[in-house]
Image (cartoon, rainbow, N blue to C red):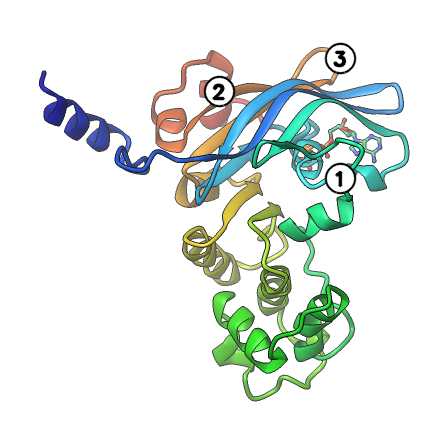
């Protein structure tokens, strides 16, 4: 097979991966072990997360998806007794080295939670506040508009920016939280089941938004919904638990490959609903 044919075949097999521009690793987990006190929650997780891709974490309850997600922006530091061994590299820099400020990390690697959590302030202030805290010197009106547009919320709220954010619907609140995250210009957005508290219409708007956002950001999403993982993600990491309830990475692949042609038997059983 000549080179052109080989390239064409690979592109057909893996349409999400461009051969001309191979995805760059933005985050690398190396032999990551996480404990809560003496409880070994996650063992030996190693994986690369690629820039401008959506990576989904799936797996049964308690397998450590959220724990691993939180390790990527050092949110676990806020949990008493949580410790991490191994390395988490962000743009080749060790996120856990002593001279790294976790607050700065959380600016570069933002997070959106399961339950929308806007501040009890105006829509405008929800966006402007984080930027102000970070000493943003630009035009705030422009920042608010751009962030709300990026989160596909501008048209719905542009005439009521002074309204309290808590009066928005759940789906709108979640898009506002995404806009708030975007406003501090992160490189990576972590999402922990961002649509699980939303109705199907609000969920599909979040899914559409994720697909748009990956042009500008790298997204890692924890989801229980396998349909959602297959719709939005380029890569899927399937986590499992061992007999000690310790989570580990069972299989990590391009999403299409993992869902259509899983290598491990456990992956196949999980995605076909044999256990959950
Ligand atoms: N703050 C904590 N303190 C102690 N143990 C914790 C803490 N958070 C999580 N764990 C434990 O760590 C393990 C992994 O939890 P984690 O929430 O990461 O799993 P998960 O796969 O995201 O689960 P789920 O799908 O149910 O949200 C579980 O056994 C859980 O009970």
Disc nearer the start of the sequence (3/1): 1
State left or right for residue 188 relative to residue 77. left
Q: Which mark is residue 244?
A: 3
Q: Nearer the viewer, residue 220 or 246?
A: 220
State left or right for residue 204 relative to residue 195. left
State left or right for residue 262 relative to residue 57. left
Asked if marks 2 and 1 touch (Cβ < 8 Å), the reply is no
Quadrant in which the N terminus appears: top left
Q: Nearer the viewer, mark 3 or mark 1?
A: 1
Q: Which mark is residue 100?
A: 1
Answer few, some or many: residues within 10 Å of disc 3's Cα (few below 14, many 20 plus, some between 14 and 19): few
Residue 102: image location, x then y, percent:
76, 44
Residue 40: image location, x then y, percent:
79, 18
In which of the image's four quarters is ligand 1 placed?
top right
Q: Is residue 249 above or below residue 62?
A: above
Helix, strand or loop at mark 1: loop
């Amino acid at each position: 097979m000549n080179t052109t044919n080989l390239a064409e075949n690979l592109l057909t097999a893996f349409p999400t991966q461009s051969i001309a521009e191979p995805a760059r690793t933005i985050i690398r987990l190396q032999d990551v072990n996480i404990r809560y006190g003496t409880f070994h929650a996650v063992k030996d997780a190693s994986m690369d997360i690629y820039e401008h891709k959506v990576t989904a974490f799936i797996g049964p309850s308690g397998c450590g998806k959220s724990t691993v997600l939180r390790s990527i922006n050092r949110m676990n530091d806020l949990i008493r007794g949580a410790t991490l061994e191994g390395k988490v590299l962000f743009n080749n820099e060790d996120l856990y080295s002593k001279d790294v400020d976790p607050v700065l990390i959380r600016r570069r690697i933002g997070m959106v939670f399961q339950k929308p959590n806007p501040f009890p302030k105006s829509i405008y202030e929800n966006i402007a506040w984080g930027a102000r805290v970070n000493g943003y010197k630009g035009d705030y009106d422009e920042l608010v508009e751009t962030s709300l547009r990026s989160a596909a919320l501008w048209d719905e709220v542009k005439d009521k920016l002074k309204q309290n954010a808590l009066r928005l619907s759940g789906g709108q609140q979640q898009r506002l939280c995404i806009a708030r995250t975007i406003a501090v210009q992160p490189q990576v957005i972590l999402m922990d089941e961002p649509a699980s508290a939303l109705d199907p219409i609000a969920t599909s708007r979040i899914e559409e938004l994720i697909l748009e956002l990956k042009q500008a950001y790298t997204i890692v999403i924890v989801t229980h919904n396998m349909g959602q993982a297959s719709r939005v993600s380029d890569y899927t990491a399937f986590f499992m638990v061992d007999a000690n309830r310790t989570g580990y990475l069972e299989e990590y692949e391009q999403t299409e490959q993992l869902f259509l042609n899983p290598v491990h038997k456990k992956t196949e059983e999980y995605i076909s609903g044999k256990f959950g």
